[in-house]
Amino acid sequence: MKINTAEFIVSNSDASKCPKDFLPEYAFIGRSNVGKSSLINMITNHKNLAKTSGKPGKTQLINHFKINNNWFLVDLPGYGYAKVSKKTKSTFQKFITDYFENREQLVCAFVLIDIRHEAQKIDIEFMSYMGESEIPFCIIFTKADKISRVKVDSHIAAYRKQMYANNWAEMPQYFVTSSTESIGKEELLSYIDEVNQEVFKNNSGFLNSN
């Protein structure tokens, strides 16, 4: 897939106020400071589409970007550490779960994980929530250029082991990426393109504008 257009549409904190367009949506979420904004900018070929910051917790709203006029990329607030109050954090969790559990247009979520670290409890717990809620998702391992390929493989194996220990039958599909070196970009966009084709082919509720 080649991305020709990427347009910011709306930010809000209420899932019921998300765009009414019935187009497939792909949500990106991960722990704060996982490199989500950089990844979004990399795959869309826009340097500043998503705002990047050295401060964790920069994204605090549901952000919709329309891609190629026929699907939405949704940038969600990070879970875990962020320099915000407990009240604000609980509000985040409320509208994030509302989005995941009620958004009909969502066809796949991408859970971003910093590959530099070994399996983190908070990531395993979040993915368990996704699985228990029957929300389709893939894993995107970020910052793969920061460690050796051997360590990348070792850390992925550790996640697989943890997920099996948490009663997963198999590990979800995953992608290894680096925003600085554009690693994994083509694989990720090809996957989205394949899913879109299936969605438009098999679900008359989604209207292909192409």
Image (cartoon, grey):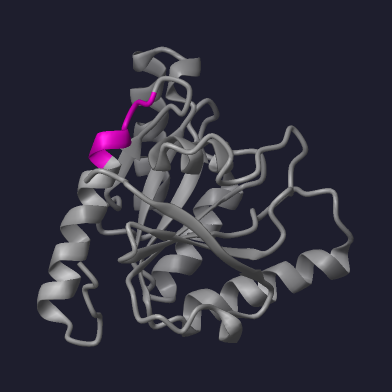
Residue 117 lies in what quarter of the image?
top right
Q: Is residue 119 above or below residue 73?
A: above
How many numbered marks does the figure carry? Answer: 0
Q: Residue at x 10, y 74 (%)?
A: 201
Residue 185 lies in what quarter of the image?
top left
Q: Residue at x 68, y 70 (%)?
A: 93
* Percent x, y of residue 121: 58, 48
Q: Is residue 202 above or below residue 64?
A: below
Q: Residue at x 23, y 80 (%)?
A: 207
Viewer-proximal residue, 62 or 133? 62
**In the displayed structure image, the side of residue 136 where residue 201 appears, left or right:** left
Q: Residue at x 61, y 47 (%)?
A: 31
Q: Is residue 96 above or below residue 65?
A: below
Q: Is residue 202 magenta?
A: no
* Percent x, y of residue 200: 17, 73
* Percent x, y of residue 149: 35, 16
Magenta stretch, residue numbers: 182-187
* Percent x, y of residue 77: 64, 58
**In the displayed structure image, the side of residue 184 where residue 58 appears, left or right:** right
Q: Is residue 185 magenta?
A: yes
Q: Which quadrant of the rendered structure holds the C terminus?
A: bottom left
* Farthest residue, direction left: 201
Residue 89 lies in what quarter of the image?
bottom right
